[in-house]
Amino acid sequence: MNIPEVNLPRIVVIGCGFAGLKFTKRINSRKYQVVLIDKNNYHTFQPLLYQVASSGLAPDSIVYPIRKIFKGKPNFYFRMASVEHISTKDQLVQTNIGSIHYDRLVIATGATNNFFGMENIEQHAMPMKSLTESLDLRSMILQNFEEALNTNDLEERNRLMNFVIVGGGPTGVELAGALSELRSHVLPNDYPDLDFRRMQIHIVEAGSRVLGAMSTHASEKAMRALDKFGVQVWLDTRVEDYDGKTVMTSKSDFASKTMIWAAGIQAAVPGGILVKKGMGNRILVDAFNAVEGMDQVYSIGDVAQIHSTKYPDGNPMLASVAEQQGAHLAKNLNKMAVGKPFIPFTYKDKGTMATIGRNKAVVDLPFWKFAGFFGWLTWMFVHLMLLVDFRSRLVVFVDWVYSYIRYDKGTRLIVRKAGTFRKQEQGFD
């Protein structure tokens, strides 16, 4: 890998998700040479992937070029590559474009889908953890309705128009709400020949309530909103199999050609590194984000698990946790550069939120829990501010205002034919 040799310690960062992005922004690159590796040349704002999948936003609204983010940062280098092997003994990272030596390594590879060993579901279900997968899902949803127009088989039409979302967390709830808005306000205008009373949206949740990681207040409000939007919620129900036509669960079977997997994630640990792992395949780290049993190797974000009294199984796999870890590790390494001691990481819970649809959202803050229209405005404002740059905020805001006023979504494009979808290889988003 063609990286200049300089008289500064080299930090190699793997992954430009929320943790890697925040770390790379905050690290003092006048004290270190920083090399960022990611298999994509862009950062993805994952909380809004469901809006790309449901035609609410264009993909370039929620991604931003990595090189542009760090334009002008001294001693910074980005390489688009996939990590193949890490040798901690030789302090070497092997990628598909060559190898690179590190003085300190930061693993920020995020999370990927977890199908819990169910091969048929992995083969046939549609996940939504990357931009590519969201675009594939958008195309599949629209292609289903195109096919539904051309079939005289009523059962096949029902399968094409029914959607099963596995997982009642924020992703599943938000996507169900977005599909409900499509059904009510958008698709009937695009496909007047179809009877959208036949379109069904199901959420299948193994737990006893939706939004299980949030308060019971949020769960109850979300359930009422989903019921109002005509979404069928199946609690205490496990998905057992899926053959591409029928979703088999512990309670009932659903005829559907689109099963969307939002039920589980696991850490995306790079290959070729022997580390101690905890829940969800996460790398065990100490209070300073250092990988247990290794020198000068750190891990942050969804891929890392820190034990604490409040979170014995590790901090929540949330963007806010990842950003705080990234900023904290950068602060510690900046301290190291000037001979100051590290300070331990403590997660500051600033709250969680989820939107269910138009004028409906739930917000859990440490000091206040609320929902409804004000919650929806709060959700929109927070997500706008979290986007990387002003242009993205402006584009997303304009799209949201247009959709709200016109009851329309402007990106209903089929970018590839149904049947050509292939799962994106495991990577570091």
Image: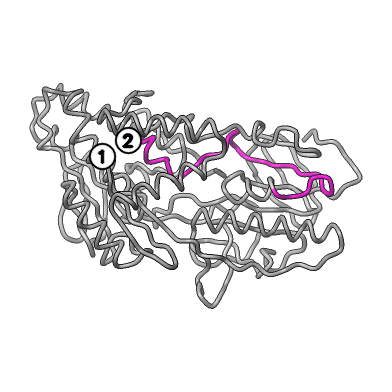
Q: Judge left or right: residue 217 versus residue 272.
A: left
Above or below: residue 280 compared with residue 232: below
**Residue drawn 36% across and 63% down?**
369
The amino acid beneath tag 2 is: Ser
Q: Which of the 4 image quadrants contains residue 346?
A: bottom right
Describe the element under mark 2 as helix, strand or loop. loop
Q: Which mark is residue 179?
A: 1
Q: Is 153 part of what is drawn in magenta?
A: no
Query: Front-most of 327 and 37?
Result: 327
Above or below: residue 364 compared with residue 270: below
Give the farthest residue toward the right. Answer: 7
Contact (CB < 8 A) between labels 2 and 1?
Answer: yes
Q: Which mark is residue 54?
A: 2
Q: Quadrant of the N terminus?
A: top right
Q: Judge left or right: residue 350 versus residue 294.
A: left
Describe the element under mark 1 as helix, strand or loop. helix
Q: How is colour applied across the structure in the image? A: one colour
Q: Which mark is residue 243?
A: none
State the image coordinates of residue 101 (x, y, percent, origin top left).
80, 46
**Residue drawn 27% across and 64% down?**
209
Give the farthest residue toward the bottom. Answer: 309
Q: Judge left or right: residue 264 versus residue 193.
A: right
State the image coordinates of residue 358 (x, y, percent, origin top left).
27, 42
State the image coordinates of residue 134 (x, y, percent, origin top left).
40, 36
First-in-chain label (2 vs 1): 2
Q: Is 35 part of what is drawn in magenta?
A: yes
Dot 1 surroundings within 10 Å: few (below 14), some, or many (20 or more)?
many
Q: Quadrant of the C terminus?
A: top right
Q: Judge left or right: residue 151 versus residue 110.
A: left
State the image coordinates of residue 301 (x, y, percent, origin top left).
58, 56
